[in-house]
Image (cartoon, grey):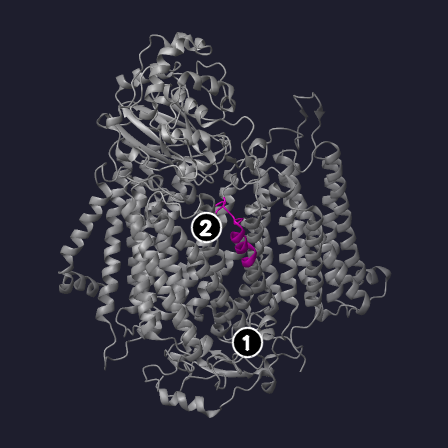
Amino acid sequence: MASFSRFCRIFAGAQMFRGLVPVARTAVLLLAVAATAGAQQYPNTSFNYTTEMNEAVTHLWDQLLFWATIVFVIVEIGILYIVFKFKARPNSPDPKHVHGNTALEIAWTAIPAVILAFIAVPTVKTIFMTQAKAPANALQVEVIGHQWWWEFRYPQYGITTATELYLPVGRPVNFKLNTKDVLHSFWIPRLGGKRDLISNRTNYLWMTPRDSMAMKSLNGSCNEYCGSSHANMKFRAFTVTPEQFASWAAHQRGPAVYGAVTPQSVPAATPAAAGAAATTRSGQIGAALADAAAPAPVGFIFPREKLDPSSLPSATPPSSIGFTAGLAGDAERGQKVYSRSSCIGCHKVSGNPMSAGVIGPNLTHFGSRYSLGGSLYENTTENLVRWIKNAPAMKPGSLMPAIGNGEYNPAIKAKVTMGGLSDQQIADVAAYLQALK
Amino acid sequence: MATTVAPPIYAPAAASASTYGEKTGVWSWITTTDHKRIGVLYLFTSLFFFIFGGLEAAVIRAQLAAPNQSLVSAELYNQLFTMHGTTMVFLAIMPLSAAFFNFLIPLQIGARDVAFPRLNAFSYWVYLLGGIFITLPIFAGLAPNGGWFGYAPLTTMAYNPGLNIDFWVLGLQILGISSLAAGFNFITTIINMRAPGMHLMRMPMFTWASFVVQFLVVLAFPVITVALVFLQFDRFFGTNFYTLTAGADPLLWQHLFWIFGHPEVYILILPAFGLVSEVLPTFSRKPLFGYAVMVYSGILIGFLGFGVWAHHMFSVGMGPIADTVFSLTTMLIAIPTGVKIFNWMSTMWGGKLTFTTSMCFSIGLVAMFTIGGLSGVTHASPPTDLQQTDTYYVVAHFHYVLFGGSIMGIFAGIYHYFPKMFGRLMNETLGKWHFWINMIGMNLTFGPMHLSGLLGMPRRIYTYDANQGWDLFNMMSSIGTAIIIVATLIFLYNFFTSLKSGPRAGRDPWGASTLEWSIPSPPPEYNFAVLPNVTSRYPLWDVTDGHDLSREHHEGHENRDDRVPTSRELGIPMPANTFKPVMAALGLCTMLGGMTLKHVNDVAFYVVVGGGATMLVVSLYAWLTSPLEESH
Amino acid sequence: MSATAVEPTMAGGESHDAHGHHYTSTGLDNRKIAIWAFIGSECMLFVSLISTYLIYKGKSRVGPYPHEAWTDPATGETFKAILNIPVTSFSTFVLLMSSLAMVLAHNAVVNRHVKRTTFLARLEGNSFFWLMSTAVLGIVFLMCQAYEFTSFVHEGLGLTTNLFSSSFFVLTGFHGAHVTAGVLWLFTLASIDKTRGLTPAEELKIDLCALYWHFVDVVWIAIFVLLYLIK
């Protein structure tokens, strides 16, 4: 034990490390700032007190970090000390051949074991707490992973949507996780608790966003590698007040208020969309929409000015997709083109009886979304027309084929000729889709 | 004890510092069965793959240096990260360790060769051919693209119909056969080929670490073999192991893979631990502190390594009970690992430390591996792991373990054993530059990844959006990678110039303690002219205990004879050079590799697979019916 | 403790004993150690295969099933429980008997020097006969397996039918491949024995094959119990 007490004395009286204290303090401070900084700078930080779940997890993390820091400092300072202290010097005698010290070795087997016990107990507690059954009053949200976009269903409200998730604060939300194809992983870092989507299995994850989280736009991502566009499988979660949620949900369950309001994000489509609003009701197919479209006001939509900068995608389409400049889309024409095109094979627009596909995202309220293509691009006319024209060029591996005339379609390994859409037709379809609020 | 005898010398000295025995020329290397030559072949091949894997990483980091970049396409990026992982694990770190197994184990236990010299050659050639097979497709854009742990069902025909995954499945099967053959060989060698008196508890630490690793190999590889056979049958013959529509459970793959995959982690790190355990005592001038505990902790790590696999799967929803069990077993592993760290520090405590490059890398391992170990403990806790898994935090963690641990240890080993392998010393000044630049580069690359991960960045993404708060950390990581490349270039320059013109090393340039330092550098093909009789754990130290190991005395021995006598002159029967293992390896790889043709052309498939199988059987028959040694 | 920690013991040439064997630490031949390592590895292989079968047991979405009848809801066709326990019990018995023959073959080689006069004693000492018997019993087992596989296919259970069929055929197929390799090994030994007679000094050759053969036999017992007997 003699050498152990020597260890202690040396650490207690290590004069040479006094100078390092301010440096270490600054380093820890910087780390702490980086790790817990505000949402503005680090919008996806995993350290939060925003749900009961991530509060428990963050507390646990704090304990782990505390013990890890102690061990880290002891080992690293120990190494530095040994390196300086026992450096070979001229005439220093050969060291004694010590083969070991049982007491010491028992000590540094036992001490880590005790530290691990300190970690293990809260760990096990938190495991059982976070994996408990969700409360009965929880909002049920079915999350369905697709290569490479997210589908969200609210069975209690009869809503099916994609890419943008609305969550009321103060109410537990229970995510039911399934995948249509390969494995994915559902994660909203600010709310906490990643969970994989496993084929032929169902996973659950629940949490309660705090009231203080109202009016936040949060980012979510896929975390299990799922193929070409794994990186582009993102989504948004908007935390809103219960009243806002009720308004949103009431509107979402029905068909779109076709062309009621022009979204701010699609300036290029403004004249056409406004025109469409006036002409729709007399349109052929528009007749089917008449009931829903007539008087109903648009429900709550997360206001654009409250979006976190990180929630508006900054990616720009590849320059290889050209598009005729200055074309004005017409939503009424667009609706007709859409309803005759291959779009309807995969997409559903409630209220448009021709469009009942279930393979692609539900587009019923597409105009109310801020991003498209799995939150890869902002939902602007410029991006949308190019997306319709050639989705695979916009998003690697996209299962949506290129449908612009003359574009190369990797699915059939040829250029689109028969049944392809002209730029004007695409502009019209885009106007129609963006009018679906 | 009070004697002044010189350390024992078991073979006459070599005059030339560049030969291995009497045979020279390319053909002698292709047909060699000499464990030292095979070790050297492993070293060069795996260094090549290490560079190749590093270049893949360089492209990855260039792509991620800033948001929304499109230097490479998503498809190519996915192939690059898959191949970076596969290359570094199976083609670089494992065979770099194998280079040391081959070269060192017989020397350390006082044997003339491994138990099955021709099987050893077979292992190497299978590794080389398998490595080429799995690496080449990237030049055609057909490289594996399912990630290095290839989770089903992404790797099944339904979601990945190209040849990419076929190359991966078959390549890994080929490499697995190489590892298994080497595993049986080294287990037998260590159990059965030790010199008289070389009890298990006198074996050098590196041999002990390797011993544990070989058991991990022979017990873990069959499991991935089965997982791969299932995948292969699914892809080639339409079985249903991972077919979702038939009701398959994707977790089957994950369990099988990680039952292999976690022991694999220890297969990668334990040899580096062993090398460091050789270097630290040598340059502390002190025996390893707590030898027995180091042995037991190594065994315990290997044993526990089979009971923690599901900690890779905390996010799949196994339920709280399973999460708890695997969390606790994982935490337990931290204990023997911590013991190793503290014992290394105590080995240095009170020593007389000389900071050679190999010593610097060894201390670097202790310092850096600790960081990887501690971040590992944060993963052992499932609730926090759920915030970290599949983010860059995990990437940071395993790079501190594998780069800060395995690679640092292997560099320590290369600097330490280079003189024994090639008879010349590496340049120490360049070595120090390499060490410090490497150290800065690795911390700049992998340190910020902790933060980008904790700040929400998923792994395996080919690009990321701006405004996510990750730009700075990614730029730092990319700059760090450039620094690592500079360090590696310095290393390569040093390695190849020292090979040609480094100063002659002599038997024992470091004043080390174990048997391999008692024979010339490079050792003659028979290693030991007389088999040693070992009576101590540190045979070369205990002989001169407390006395100055006089260099002059040493030189005196070296000058006694200018020429190494051949095995023939000494009447030592050595394994003959043979081409049969190469042919068998070629046959095996043709047979397995040819299976990719199933999806291309049926006739070619049967011709190539049949041809390969015939070649394998014929050369195996010739091999098994011919004697090992030349008749004298 | 002696003054030197190491001292030369044997000159190179002397490390061979009278029979030309290398010095080994345990006194056992290298191949003996290696085959045990190999068998340990093989255990993990079969444990993985059997575990997979058990994990997928009862998870098949369509029949035929191993232990219960199944009616295809689409066609109304009925399939009976597929496993044929009597045939497999017979083949299991055959394989067990082959292990007995293997033991007798080993015994015959080791006790080559024993003088044998009666017919039975001569039979007991006829290593070629016992080696061939082992191999032939192995072939009978393989024929039973071939019969089983073909009848399964006729009854509508192919390799790709369901989870059960995939895991069943791959597991038993792997075992069958091991038996085949063992049979080839036995024939090789038998032909050596026929041409020049295996000597007691070559006991190891039989010993290695016997270890392998018994291992393959034990694996089959596990398969028979877990797949066939336990419903």
Q: Which residues are magenta?
A: B131-150
Chain identifier of the residue bearing label 2 in the image: B
Indicate the amino acid at tag 2.
Leu
- Residue at (68%, 53%) from the top-left corner? B609
Residue A126: where, in percent of width, then height?
31, 36
Provide residue B185's location: percent of width, then percent of height.
56, 64
The residue carrying pointer 2 sits among few (fewer than 14), some (14 to 19) or many (20 or more) residues within 10 Å by Cα, namely many
Circle nearer the N terminus (1, 2): 2
Query: Which of the image's four quarters has the N terminus of chain C?
Result: bottom left
> Does residue A164 appear to the left or right of B136 in the view shown?
left
| Quadrant location of the C terminus of chain C in the rendered image | top right
SS class of the residue under badge 2? helix
The residue indicated by pointer 1 is B112
Residue sitting nearer the eye, A116 or A90: A90
Q: Amino acid at mark 1?
A: Arg
Q: Is residue B546 magenta?
A: no
Tell me if A236 is positioned left or right of C160 in this view.
left
Label 2, on which residue? B80
